[in-house]
């Protein structure tokens, strides 16, 4: 499996020689340099992420790892006004959707899609309470993709439409 981003290449080659996660942690602790001349070093967060991906499991607290990565992905989707998709998150994490679903549920206690939707709905409720944005803008800002999918998910979750929810809050 090729590393998902270039900074993982050095860790991946080390992992190929020595499969011991403790060896990888030692290398990380020694301030891993990407080039032999030491011109570029990777930071702690990148190193931990690379180590987790290379060893195909988080080396630190797995629940915190998955929640942090999920939140980072949701934030990037919000910033780019793109839909939140479990299959894209799986690819980003160098996992198949099935592997991701299994690992995420084992670590976090809920499914990836359920977690994403719960977070999206929390963000939507906050925007409905605190802004005057329309449902279309809120749908895009929270990563639902379309106003229709947002409306359906919101009604299913709260038992009322986004407009009814906003009126009830004010």
Image: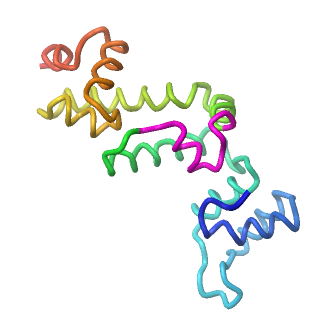
What is the chief secondary structure element of the magenta stretch? helix
Count of numbered badges drawn on the protein: 0
Residue plotted at (52% across, 44% down) = 88
Looking at this view, name the residue that lies furthest to the top. 159
Q: Is residue 14 above or below residue 88?
A: below
Residue 126: x and y, percent? 26, 30
Q: Is residue 149 left or right of residue 53?
A: left
Q: Is residue 160 left or right of residue 104?
A: left
Residue 137 is drawn in which quadrant? top left
Q: Is residue 78 left or right of residue 84?
A: left
Residue plotted at (32% across, 35% down) = 145
Residue 37 is drawn in which quadrant? bottom right
Q: Nearer the viewer, residue 135 or 128?
A: 135
Q: How is the image coloured?
A: rainbow
Q: Which residues are magenta?
A: 84-99
Q: Nearer the viewer, residue 153 or 121?
A: 153
Q: Is residue 54 above or below residue 110?
A: below
Residue plotted at (74% across, 57% down) = 1
* Magenta highlight on residue 139: no
Residue 20: x and y, percent? 86, 58
Q: Is residue 135 above or below residue 75?
A: above
Q: Nearer the viewer, residue 136 or 119?
A: 136
Residue 28: x and y, percent? 71, 68
Residue 107: x and y, percent? 66, 33
Looking at this view, name the residue that lies furthest to the bottom. 37
Quadrant showing the C terminus: top left
Residue plotted at (66% across, 66% down) = 8
């Amino acid at each position: 499996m090729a590393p998902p981003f270039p900074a993982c290449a050095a860790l991946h080659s080390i992992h190929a020689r020595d499969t011991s996660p403790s060896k990888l942690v030692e290398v990380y602790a020694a301030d891993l340099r990407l080039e032999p001349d030491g011109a570029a070093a990777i930071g702690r967060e990148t190193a931990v992420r690379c180590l987790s991906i290379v060893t195909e499991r988080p080396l630190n607290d797995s629940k915190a790892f998955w929640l942090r990565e999920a939140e980072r992905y949701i934030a990037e989707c919000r910033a780019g006004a793109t839909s939140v998709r479990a299959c894209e998150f799986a690819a980003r994490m160098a996992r198949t959707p099935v592997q991701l679903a299994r690992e995420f549920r084992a670590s976090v206690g809920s499914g990836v899609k359920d977690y994403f939707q719960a977070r999206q709905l929390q963000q939507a409720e906050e925007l409905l309470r605190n802004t005057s944005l329309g449902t279309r803008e809120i749908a895009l800002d929270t990563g639902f993709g379309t106003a229709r999918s947002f409306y359906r998910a919101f009604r299913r979750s709260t038992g009322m439409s986004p407009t009814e929810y906003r009126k009830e809050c004010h």
